[in-house]
Image: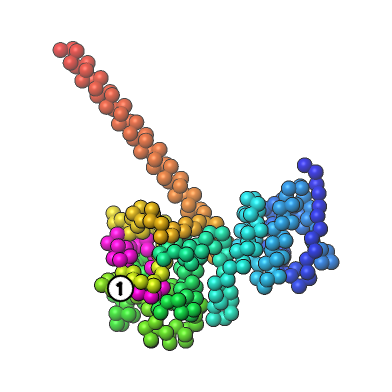
Amino acid sequence: MSITETIIDIPIEHEKNIFGNYDSLIKIIEKTLNVTIIERNGEIKVVGNEDDVTRAKSVLLQLIELSKRGNSITEQQVNYALSLSFEEKEKEIVEIDKELICHTVNGKPIKPKTIGQKSYVDQIRKKMIVFGIGPAGTGKTYLAMAMGITAFKNDQVNKIILTRPAIEAGEKLGFLPGDLQSKVDPYLRPLYDALHQIMGPEAYIKNSEKGLIEVAPLAYMRGRTLDNAFIILDEAQNTTPAQMKMFLTRIGYGSKVVITGDLTQKDLPRGVTSGLDMAIKVLSKIDDLGFSYLTGQDVVRHPLVQKIVKAYDAYEDKQKRYEKASHGQRGYSKIKRGIKAEKIRSNRYESR
């Protein structure tokens, strides 16, 4: 292939944002697409093979547009734009950015950052009950929380209810001092953190004292009917089938429900079926329910988290293939032993 080059104009005020500290973001593009990028006097020159240069130009134009809209360009956005460019979908990253949910108490906009997250948010808007399923860092709980707070502020619901099963993450926490609320608070801390960040501690305390925002363990839902509420069940992979059924049958008129979970991080005792697993099998054909499956590509935490998720997924896939092959080999060996035993019996019979 012949070497080609192209020139892109870049406003000086967006240069640092696009290039990153020590040109770290530009180096990611150069390494991924095998191009050379040079900046001179408000222009970016991209040099490389024609297809790579075309792809790099398109990615850079999308990042410049994001920067013009006031976004701080991150490594995650660059990596995601690059991954979309191989599917010729890089322009969608700008379309996703138009989707504003709300602002945090500090004025930071909360938006979906991937196609998977946008689909998840769209499902929450359209469906009464939505299952958000995916690995850590995909924004399942945070986006659901933002949607719930927005619905509450717009008077679409009268209250917000946040709940999760009180299951230790592989550790025995032992006796915790204090009243009942103090004992369950450690399990619910991630929900409090998101509430404080989006709504602010003062607004949360004010609405909590009025009973308009409730953060409680799943056991507290039994026997209730939850009308006109935005309800989030977090860590649903740690529910039992009975708990999941109990929760789903609490939902009343005017309510919206989001159930989030990561099927790869179950903390249930060995041999106990996950309520989320069963719900997916039992309810997947009901049209009024939404199922949104997020993947490692939707991870929006530190880029290292995305690599960790991918590494675990690859390892687990390898283990499954090994177990399947081992099971097949054991079955084959068993058949061979059976044939051999049958031959021995047959020979004994003939010798008689």
Based on the displayed image, in which of its 4 quarters is residue 15 positioned?
bottom right
Return the residue at label 1.
225
Against 235, is 194 above or below? below
Residue 34: image location, x then y, percent: 72, 50
Residue, x 71% and y 56% (percent of image)?
Answer: 58
Nearest the eye: 34 or 108:
108
Left or right: residue 322 versus residue 218 is right
Which quarter of the image is occupied by the N terminus? top right
* Image height of 163 relative to 270, above or below: below
Q: Position of residue 147 (x, y in %)?
A: 49, 72
Q: Which residues are magenta?
A: 225-249
Q: To which quarter of the image does residue 282 belong? A: bottom left
Q: Is residue 100 left or right of residue 6?
A: left
Q: Residues within 10 Å of mark 1 (few under 14, many from 20)?
A: few
Side of 39 relative to 228 (left or right): right
Q: Amino acid at mark 1?
A: Thr
Q: Looking at this rendering, what residue extends furthest in the right direction?
A: 41
**Residue 231 appears in the rendering:** no
Q: Residue at x 30, y 82 (%)?
A: 178
Q: Is residue 303 left or right of residue 202?
A: right
Is 92 contained in the magenta span?
no
Q: Secondary structure at mark 1?
A: loop
